[in-house]
Image (cartoon, grey):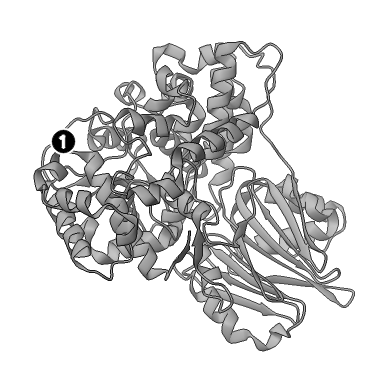
Amino acid sequence: MSGVVGVIDFERDLERHRPLLVALTATMANRGPDGEGLWLSPRAVLGYRALGSGAGAADQPFAIDVGGATVVACVTGAPTGLGEVARQLRAGRCGVTPGASTAELVARAYLMWGEDVVRRLGGAFALAIWDGRSEELVLARDRMGGQTLYHAPTRTGLVFASERKALLAHPEVDPVVDMEGLREVIAHALPPGPLFSGFGQVDSAEVVRYGRSGWHRHRYWDLEPRPHTDDVDATVARVRELLEENVRLSVPEDTEGLVATLSGGIDSSSVTALVAAELRRRGAADLRTFTVGFTDGEFQRDAVRDTQDAPFARAVAEHVGSQHRLVELDARRILDPDVRLGLMRAKDCPTRIYDMDASQYLFLQHVAAAGGRIAFTGGMGDQLFHGARWSTDPHLVDSGTFPWIALAQRHGAENGFGTRLLNHDTLRKLDLPSYYRDAYAESVAEVEFLPEDDGAQRRIRQLSHLLLTRFRTDAGLYNSVGLQMRAPINSVELVEYAYNIPAEMQRHGGIEKGLLRAAVADTLPEKVVRRPQSATPVSRNPAYARRLQEEFTAILADPASPVLPLIDLQAAARLAESPDELVRNRLSRADIDLVLQLNLWLDHYRVRLAL
């Protein structure tokens, strides 16, 4: 999905630091496999890795001379609204070249409108602009946080990048993690932030300036409560209209390498059907769709999975006429060292649910290897239309904490999934109960209400705000294999509209995501429209648990394993000697998965804990 990195320094001459810039930029080669661009000046250097998913995508950094000073722009992601930006620039007699690249349009728009350029863009994007006139760096992210930007101080300036690993490659940046960072890694209450001590990030919907006088930051958008005056039929029609418009804007002119990941659930199926229809309207080639499965035998129902994905995905593919492929994974492959390390480097920290995320990582490798470049997904459907089971359970919603933490506590993980092998001293220092309480209180305090909101509407507004600001779709796995993720459901127009839909409408038809189902019912088979929500598939192969036990035993036997001071060694030894427990108990597997990931993270990133 492309990546940017840069260094700003007000004392040293950075033009002589080309080898450093090359090294920093190279850390993001996976997310930008189609080329590299470098730009150097005394005060600022910028590096870019390109994913060539559109005209001029690799033409970055883009520089314009302005009265002897230079303005340079880099753009990651896939911003929408560029056609209108180009039209307005030409109307203002701005010299936009034919077929101008994204970076050129953004640079020229910045010269015309300054920071307000971000208000004219939609979609997922991050901007990095060096304004040589004032010697200031401008960084910005899209409203929904679809692209990341991190920064860290150096002795005489700062380094910034799309990924933390690029910052860590700078010789003046140390991989120190304090208690606050370790809580983010372990707790799984909030999306991981900067993590490392001294690191910062540009927040979603934020513009920041950095110069000799320091930092200046402001938000340019927030979720706002608004009266919802549409009836049910008008609401369904408006959801459909917004989805179709978002798909139209998201499908590029060049559809080479365009694919969809299809689970057979209503979110991905909706997007698949609408993208396929848009391609037919344009006379383009048929959409290619991919579904993940496993080679280990019969499907087994569990608490969050009622049905198997493959039959529903195949029905959608046949209905919309896509070229469909089932990618079947061997569960044992999930624990291969290259997969474990690849997933770690995709996220730069331990993942939430290893087996689920590792399966998706392997699946996306297959999609990219088959020629996929731009992958459409149903991302944010659960959040926007309240599809996850813990968001429709009133006991979890009213628990007084994050519903996903309350779900873990219901199943016996008092401090959250994966935490039951941490030792008493670690848990005492982390103080996760206080952390959850304070983080939840801070999160819900941001929510604004309308005077007419009753108790039910206030609760659903709080839940919606949590889901949309604290439980966002992560594009990291897609980025790591050179795929650009596009999620038309996750558009600001649809988010603003759905955020204000009344509580009684959200379960239209008596089923979760009823509004979305009704909006696309004419595009999909009836059995898909009525299929209940089902979680991302994982393997139930006993060989996975046995392999997990072998890795865990090896770590416990190695006195140099960096994770050992954090865990209860006696409890760990008992679990390592109970293979049947690992086969039948997902919580126990999650506990071991976190320990294994922590060990790899501490070792590979040379993390120094400052607790």
x and y percentages locating residue 287 in the rendered image: 39, 46
Which amino acid does the dot numbered 1 rest on?
Answer: Phe
Q: Nearer the viewer, residue 283 or 534?
A: 534
Q: Residue furthest right?
A: 67
Instruction: Tell me the SS state at disc 1.
Output: loop
Q: Is residue 362 visible?
A: no
Residue at coordinates 24% horizontally, 38% vertically from top-left?
310
Q: Quadrant of residue 388?
A: top left
Q: Is residue 308 visible?
A: yes
Left-right relation of 359 to 395: left
x and y percentages locating residue 609 in the rendered image: 45, 63
Q: Neighbour class for label 1 at 10 Å: few (<14), some, many (≥20)? A: some
Q: Which residue is mark 1?
A: 299
x and y percentages locating residue 377 in the rendered image: 43, 43
Q: Residue furthest bottom?
A: 16
Relative vertical location of residue 374 with respect to residue 452 in this rendering, above or below: below
Residue at coordinates 33% horizontally, 32% vertically from top-left?
319
Q: Nearer the viewer, residue 16 or 442?
A: 442
